[in-house]
Image: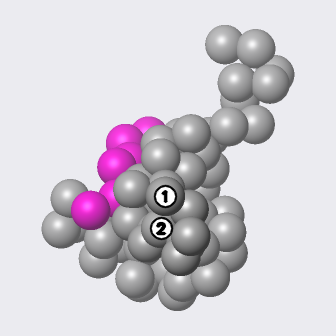
Amino acid sequence: MTARDNSQIMTVEEVAAYLKLSKITVYKLVKKGQLPGFRVGNSWRFRKDRILEIMSEQMPEEPGSN
């Protein structure tokens, strides 16, 4: 893993800030399987590219983009 790859791993706090959610909401989304993450010891970690992918799937298309 390179330093650049390492910066693509996010903590719960970073994901919450990035998505403008509370940390509790992030934990709930993980539990429901709606937000992919993995555990490192007792902490959750998230790949930024997967978060962006999920966001792009969830966002509605803008009018006139067809």
Labelled disc at residue 15: none
Helix, strand or loop status at disc 2: loop
Answer whether labels 1 and 2 touch (C-beta < 8 Å).
yes
Tell me the tag on residue 66: 1
**Foreground label between 1 and 2:** 1
Nearer to me, 2 or 53: 53
- Residue 65 percent coordinates (x, y): 56, 62
> Which amino acid type is shown beneath numbered disc 1?
Asn
Mark-to-mark CA distance, 1 and 2: 9 Å
Image location (x, y in percent) of residue 56: 49, 56
State which quarter of the image contains the N terminus. top right
Indicate the secondary structure of the residue bearing disc 1: loop
Q: Which mark is residue 61?
A: 2
Which sits earlier in the primary sequence, circle 1 or circle 2?
Answer: 2
Q: Can residue 12 be seen at all in this image of the molecule?
A: no
Q: Amino acid at mark 2?
A: Glu
Q: Is residue 9 left or right of residue 39?
A: right
Give above or below for 66 relative to 37: below
Please report the residue visible at 56 percent of the width from the left and 70 percent of the height from the top. 64
Q: Residues within 10 Å of mark 2 (few under 14, many from 20)?
A: few
Instruction: Provide the residue span drawn in magenta.
Output: 34-40
Seen at 75% across and 37% down, the residue is 7
Q: Quadrant of residue 29?
A: bottom left
